[in-house]
């Protein structure tokens, strides 16, 4: 009996935040440690589940949580504790009546081999469709997919024939926004930070055109060239001088869905954006959104996406890194645009 | 017969734009000239009306038209030609079937004693209610009134109990926004640039509170003090560092109606506004609007306002300057916050 019990204790590797981060995060801001974990929900844990983490998601918003936050929509990570993030996992043990051993879920977990989830168990989504890659639940079928879907369809109010501009267009969200825009008959152009990404957008993802913003000395001039009649819809992922240039190129009654501003996340002080008077003169609606607000509609969204995937009508590009130990460098890639598609970390394949 | 004809030619004083303006406008950018005008619509003018201008309106947006504009919602004035602006006038002669001699109208006219209106005659609004001061048709019953009414009720989506902040609150628009906000049960605070204006807001116009932004070394700290729980609705009239401070103090799902940004109009280069990421994190909707879009609903608006005026439920403060020759200095006052309420110029009283 002692043997049986001991056999359930395994090593739990963890990626720990060493300290609050200022400026660009570095690998040395995180550290790999090991602990022991018993493969069952501890007595006294209440209604909880023990998750074996399979895939972890690297997302830009995580940068906020690495720093000190005040009055934010999210909270800081705790130095000395594992990084918290979205992921896909398998239930190893459960004392929660809603979850059974063996079930697959996606939602908030931690950067480690095994995570005990005590609070917010209900916020996990069960994965029932297993015909798609499990990693997709960190991307097209997870938070970034829902962000693109609801952000585009509900915040942008798209109409057939309108012009759409997507920044960070080869990223986890942007690549889907472009495809959704095409699906409703819009003309869509994306910007990205390498020739390889531009090629992906134009030749694999169906964007009408794309450009490498790093090769453009003047973004305002670039946008005037790509959108001679102006932009009806801007899906904002980057902020800063791109937003400034976009404002000068918006059309009357244009809409800006403010999803993220990755260019600003590693700055000690955010940049000022000029030309906001364009919002008045052109009657622009700029609207921020956070995907959590749309989660009650998740099932309808996932049914739609799975159907599109089944029919081969939508593509998704992932940048998959193997091994929990490589999660810190994978996360950091995001802030240098070094990821090619959705950044995923494989902790275990089953 | 010659005498009778001559008696109809009178002097037409005109305020001419001398040249395009950079930076703050000066009186010397405008010049008073005189011409002769025959008091009838010239033969060959087509369907036109000759207007005797009574009241002229000084409005911040006019600053744009004094400079060189590209791709704007409005066009530049023409150097050497009279300033164009809103006003109230009486029809002196008409060859237009829709207008008769003696009728009162408000709408776009020119800064002169008499204006021949050939195009856009249909955009003039007839004044039928004469129980209110005629000058009100440059303010509470004209463009600024409609701006406040539609901007607040239709762009801000106000709900009872919400907190509202109005900048330039003692101006032509702001003073009404505050009163409309109170009428739907909001808590409203205004900012203005003098103690006298603050007193007006608090003690005459029914604002819950008001402050002098010039006395606040840190607008973010000031707003935190006045709105400890944050701002639900911001009616934006000034832009620049006030907008930046407001963004830090908005509540989740807050709305910013972008009406104007007067702090930016005289700058060679607009200031950058930081903290736009707050729009994402707090799901803020910032929406520009231009009152022309609401003019089809003008009659309903004016009926509402006239009823409120009749019942003594709304106040309006005007800063009335006598004489066309004083129109340039009256306009310039706006950009220094030297007007006390709606800036009006009396050209003639009847």
Image (tube, coloured by chain):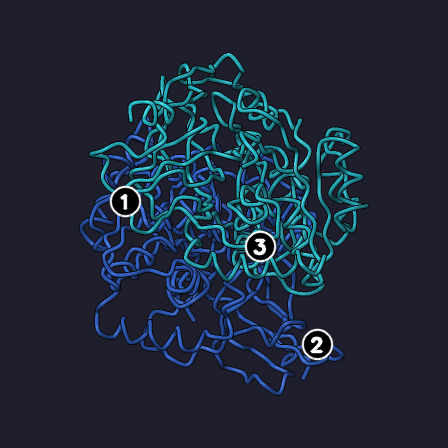
Chain colours: A cyan, B blue
For the C terminus of chain A, which image quadrant?
top right
Give the alpha-carbon distance from disc 1 to disc 2, as whole Å. 47 Å
Name the residue rendered at 47%, 34% in the picture: A53
- Residue A279, image x, y percentages: 55, 49
Return the residue at label 1: B197
Same subunit, labels 1 and 3: the answer reads no
Q: Are marks 3 and 2 on the same chain?
A: no
Q: Is residue A275 left or right of residue B280?
A: right
Q: Which residue is mark 3?
A: A152
Disc with the residue nearer the chain's start (1 vs 2) = 2
* Residue for badge 2: B42
Q: Which residue is rendered at x = 60% and y = 55% of the image? A: A254
Q: Which of the chains bears the disc numbered 3? A: A
Within 10 Å of the Cα at label 1, are there few (<14), some (14-19), or many (20+) other Cα atoms? many
Q: Is residue B286 visible?
A: yes
Q: Quadrant of residue A144?
A: top right
Front: mark 1 or 2: 1
């Amino acid at each position: 009996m002692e043997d049986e019990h001991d056999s359930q204790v395994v090593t739990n590797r963890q990626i720990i935040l060493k300290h609050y981060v200022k400026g660009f995060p570095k690998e040395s801001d995180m550290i790999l440690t090991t602990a022991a974990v018993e493969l069952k929900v501890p007595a006294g844990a209440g209604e909880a589940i023990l998750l074996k983490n399979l895939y972890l998601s690297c997302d830009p918003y995580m940068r906020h949580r690495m720093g000190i936050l005040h009055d934010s929509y999210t909270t800081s990570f705790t130095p000395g504790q594992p990084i918290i993030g979205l992921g896909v996992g398998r239930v190893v043990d459960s004392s929660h009546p809603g979850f059974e051993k063996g079930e697959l879920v996606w939602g908030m977990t931690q950067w480690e081999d095994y995570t005990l989830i005590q609070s917010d168990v209900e916020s996990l989504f069960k994965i029932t469709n297993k015909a798609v890659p499990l990693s997709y639940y960190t991307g097209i079928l997870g938070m970034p997919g829902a962000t693109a879907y609801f952000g585009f369809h509900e915040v942008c109010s798209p109409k057939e024939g309108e012009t759409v501009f997507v920044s960070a267009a080869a990223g986890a969200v942007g690549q889907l926004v472009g495809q959704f825009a095409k699906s409703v008959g819009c003309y869509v152009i994306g910007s990205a930070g390498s020739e390889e990404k531009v090629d992906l957008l134009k030749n694999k993802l169906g964007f009408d055109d794309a450009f490498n913003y790093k090769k453009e000395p003047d973004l305002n001039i670039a946008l005037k060239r790509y959108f001679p009649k102006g932009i009806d819809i801007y899906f904002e992922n980057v902020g800063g001088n791109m937003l400034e240039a976009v404002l000068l190129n918006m059309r009357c009654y244009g809409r800006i869905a403010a999803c993220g501003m990755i260019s600003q996340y590693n700055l000690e002080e955010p940049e000022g954006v000029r030309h906001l008077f364009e919002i008045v003169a052109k009657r622009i609606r700029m609207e921020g959104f956070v995907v959590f607000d749309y989660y009650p509609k998740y099932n309808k969204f996932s049914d739609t996406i799975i159907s599109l995937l089944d029919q081969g009508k939508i593509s998704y590009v992932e940048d998959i890194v193997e091994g929990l130990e490589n999660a810190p460098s994978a996360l950091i890639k995001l802030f240098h645009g070094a990821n090619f598609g959705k950044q995923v970390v494989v902790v275990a394949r089953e």
